[in-house]
């Protein structure tokens, strides 16, 4: 998979159209189309945006031989991004409470019959 195909894979994995994805990574829709088709390469800023906003593994993204996306690349779905935005908007104390709830839920799922 080449770099353009990987960018397309990230976009589609997040259920975004070109316009939405281009807006998130800071390029025009035309530039994104060119990147996905292999006409041009993304700038360093675009690669950085992919890494930050979509939690892309740079080794996978930049390695032309890296075709196994399941083992080295993690994408964040739209739902996860919305959840993260919601959490970030909470006051610090509520974030702490939410984290405690998450830990309780995780322990409960790990050891379901300990109640």
Image (cartoon, helix red, strand yellow):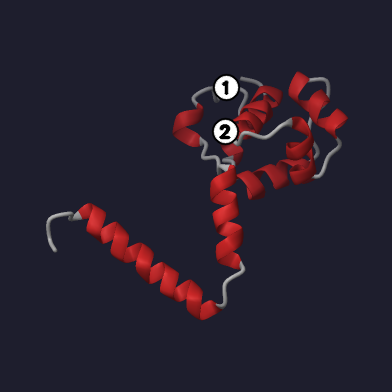
From the top left corner, tell me how far across and down residue 55 is, in percent.
58, 46
Q: Is residue 17 above or below residue 108?
A: above
Q: Which residue has dot 1 on it?
A: 65
* Residue drawn at point x = 29 percent, y = 65 percent: 104
Q: Is residue 103 left or right of residue 1?
A: left
Q: How far, Cα to Cα, is label 2 from label 1? A: 8 Å
Marks 2 and 1 in Cβ contact (< 8 Å): no
Q: Crowding at label 1, few (<14), some or many (≥20) Cα neighbours within 10 Å?
A: few
The part of the image, by quadrant, that contains residue 62 is top right
Q: Which residue has dot 2 on it?
A: 60
Q: Is residue 88 left or right of residue 26?
A: left
From the top left corner, tell me how far across and down residue 19 is, in percent.
79, 35
Mark 2 or mark 1: name the one nearer the start of the chain. 2
Observer-nearest of 42 and 78: 78
Observer-nearest of 49 and 92: 92
Q: Crowding at label 2, few (<14), some or many (≥20) Cα neighbours within 10 Å?
A: many
From the top left corner, tell me how far across and down residue 102 is, in percent.
37, 63
Identify the mark at residue 9; answer none if there is no mark: none
Q: Secondary structure at mark 1?
A: loop
From the top left corner, tell me how far across and down residue 50 is, in percent.
68, 42
């Amino acid at each position: 998979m080449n770099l353009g195909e990987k960018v397309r894979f990230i976009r589609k994995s997040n259920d975004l159209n070109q316009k939405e994805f281009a807006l998130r990574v800071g390029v025009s829709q035309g530039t994104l189309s060119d990147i996905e088709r292999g006409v041009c390469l993304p700038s360093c800023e675009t690669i950085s945006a992919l890494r930050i906003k979509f939690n892309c593994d740079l080794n996978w993204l930049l390695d032309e031989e890296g075709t196994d996306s399941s083992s080295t690349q993690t994408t964040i779905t739209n739902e996860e991004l919305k959840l993260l935005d919601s959490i970030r908007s909470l006051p610090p104390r509520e974030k702490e409470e939410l984290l405690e709830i998450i830990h309780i839920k995780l322990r409960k799922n790990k050891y379901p019959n300990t109640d």
